[in-house]
Image (cartoon, rainbow, N blue to C red):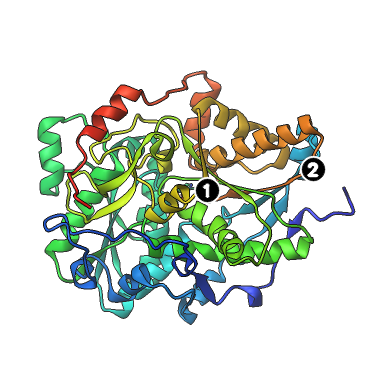
Amino acid sequence: MADQPTKYLLAEKDIPTTWYNIQADLPQPLPAVLHPGTQQPIGPADLAPLFPMGLIEQEVSTKRDIDIPGEVIDIYRLWRPSPLYRAHRLEKALGTPARIYYNYEGSSPSGSHKSNTSVPQAYYNKVEGVKRITTETGAGQWGSALAMACQFFGIDCKVFMVKVSYEQKPYRKAMMEMFGAQVSASPSNETECGRAILAKDPKCNGSLGIAISEAVELAVQDPNTKYALGSVLNHVLMHQTIVGIETMQKFKLAGDWPDIIVACTGGGSNFAGIAFPFIGSKLRGESKEARVIAVEPAACPSLTKGKLTYDFGDTGHLTPLVKMHTLGSTFIPPGIHAGGLRYHGMGPLVSHLVHLGEVEPVAVPQLEIFQAAVQFARAEGIIPAPEPSHALAIAIREALKCKEEGKSRAILFNLCGHGHFDMQAYTDYFAGKLRDYEYPAEEVAMALAGLPNVAA
Ligand SMILES: *Cc1c(COP(=O)(O)O)cnc(C)c1O
């Protein structure tokens, strides 16, 4: 073991200078995004009230390599390149012949991969003179990352935080305020959409779908305000590909290549980040085939139990219609602790790749992921967030399969954030308060019954 490194590190000069746009290599193009009124494909002008043109162009681009602006790279230097670890101690604890690797994004200032996209998003808004950005946040990782990026570029930041997380994770709110953001629990009484939901259900726990509606509502009302989303959209997933591009370089240093790539999926951004560059290289016939696995919670199973169809991105139906795996935009998930994985939909690119058979989806129950997180922390010393612990649980399942079969496969998972703000979840787990919860088929059917009627 001692003759094999534990960390594979690149130098600052190796930070990639382009993001990878998988739209250039898709065997079938993405289905169009539709206007909710006319059900016709939307154009850039339809998105202009929400996003700066620089990001809208990236959203629809089919160019393979997109230049990363120098000002963005200079900020990336604060935490990039990120380390790739070989999990020698976890392998030993499992007694597996598998070679387990994890890419660690928890060393970014906000503690997750989200800063990889918050910085370019704030940058393109700054270039176009935007004064304020509104957003939603679930577990608070995205809100923290955007608050930091807005602070760097002198933009005001307004965050609607899903109420159940606002109450579970007060330190995330404090962190956003540290970076100068204004934070409200959602549903709030600051928007029409929030007030309508509170009138029906004053105790509503909130959801990402509701918080998105609140943030979008404020953005469309003010020409100096735009909206930012931390996942799901094509440009967001593309910004994260810096992770996979670096990871490929780190695997070259290791003289190895993954047989299995695993990441958790909330809206699909950390998954896309690590997996898309590998999938693209396979689609172009440049590297060997790897199994790519997307892991979601059994309590919010959009890929494994949802439907691939046109749906709204938000509960208030202010967004365009996108074709994605969805549980229905009225879906309010149970208050599971992986707050970053509670979105009703899934990134259209990830949905499309599942549909094309390039990605295998799997759902895992909550207790297995906490068990995996504890085992990992005790072996490797890093406390993972509950979200990437979904990927970890599957990496462990695959490593144990290697043990059974006496095979040594290289398993890569994306450790996309640390769990330092999730200690209440771990406290609840140790107190035996957490339960497995599988979203009942009847409720999935009910939420899906409310899907919009789209002819396409
Ligand atoms: C936001 C977040 C997620 C879920 O979002 P994706 O876009 O699917 O990556 C998962 N893990 C962490 C640590 C997050 O911050």
Q: How crowded is mark 1: few (under 14 residues within 10 Å), some or many (20 or more)?
A: many
Horizontal side of 250 relative to 349 (left or right) equals right
Asked if the residue at label 2 sits under 8 Å from ligand 1, the reply is: no
Q: Tell me the SS state at disc 2.
A: loop
Q: Tell me the SS state at disc 1.
A: loop
Label 2 or label 1, whichever comes before in sequence order = 1
Q: Which of 130 and 255 is in front in this view?
A: 255
- Residue 136 on image: x %, y %: 30, 51
Gap between marks 2 and 1, in whole Å? 22 Å
Three-letter amino acid code at the position of disc 1: Val
Q: How crowded is mark 2: few (under 14 residues within 10 Å), some or many (20 or more)?
A: some
Q: Quadrant of residue 120?
A: bottom left
Residue shown at the point (66%, 59%) measured from the top left: 83
Three-letter amino acid code at the position of disc 2: Ser
| 173 is higher (above) or lower (below) than 46 | above
Q: Name the residue under label 1.
A: 359
Residue shown at the point (78%, 60%) measured from the top left: 254
Residue shown at the point (72%, 57%) measured from the top left: 257
Horizontal side of 48 relative to 11 (left or right) equals left
- Residue 181 on image: x %, y %: 32, 58
